[in-house]
Image (cartoon, coloured by chain):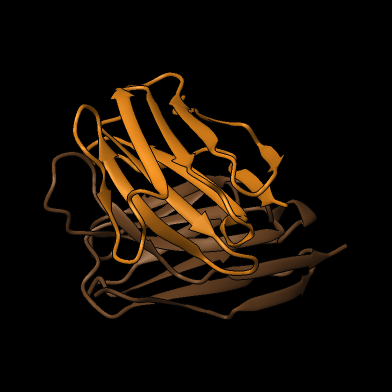
Amino acid sequence: GAVVSQHPSWVICKSGTSVKIECRSLDFQATTMFWYRQFPKQSLMLMATSNEGSKATYEQGVEKDKFLINHASLTLSTLTVTSAHPEDSSFYICSAGQVDQPQHFGDGTRLSIL
Amino acid sequence: SQELEQSPQSLIVQEGKNLTINCTSSKTLYGLYWYKQKYGEGLIFLMMLQKGGEEKSHEKITAKLDEKKQQSSLHITASQPSHAGIYLCGADIPYSGAGSYQLTFGKGTKLSVIP
């Protein structure tokens, strides 16, 4: 149980395009979904927290207009990197959680902007 | 803000050896989680500890949360190549919104197991 699916696993695109990453909880309803960014050999950095039906809460330094988060249902959250540039290249991971339960993570999306 | 310090940063052990990874918090831990990550992949949940003095085991991995709830250790017995990866400890941080808590993570411990 507690499977989180993240798609796509790897995307390469040109600078200036927008990229959407999906995060789905397959066998449970997630009260909250989290988006993280991870740089090579670094730990996870929380970008934003989203609850279904409400606006995401972004961490300090994360641009809301650059990283659009939509949490339309209890099983789906999306992260859209708008007008992506090479500096946005990174490994993005989502997680889904329920109250008093551990967060379960997707397999991550490797984003490469040319 | 709460900070988690993991030690060691990296560890190379011979297959069959025991090892311990530590996670020390700057503040009291209300929920401590251990995850394993293979480079470039997602995190696999290992264990959750909430009570001071709590100890949990799964197969050859044992995690403990000390009585004062500011340090946790992860112990692997008779390590195998399949144990290799990056071990991350994460701690609940109070979150004012509805839903589950946010997590703050340590920087990870990279474990290599030599056959």
The colour assigned to chain A within the rendered structure: orange
Of all residues, the one furthest to the front in this rendering is A16
In this rendering, is residue B16 above or below B21?
above
Residue B36 falls left or right of residue A58: right
Q: The brown chain is which one?
A: B
Image location (x, y in percent) of residue A102: 35, 43
Q: Which residue is drawn at 54% across and 49% down?
A: A92
**Which is more toward the observer, B12 or B26?**
B26
Between B39 and A20, the residue placed more toward the observer is: A20
Residue A77 percent coordinates (x, y): 39, 30
User: Relative to A39, is B68 on the left or the right?
Assistant: left
Residue in view at x 48 percent, y 43 percent? A82
Q: Residue at x 51, y 71 (%)?
A: B107
Question: Dividing the picture into quarters, in which one does residue B27 lie?
Answer: bottom left
Q: Where is residue B103 in the image (x, y as percent from the top left)?
A: 33, 56
A30 in relation to A108, above or below: above
State the residue at coordinates (65%, 66%): A40
From this viewpoint, which residue is outermost toward the right? B115
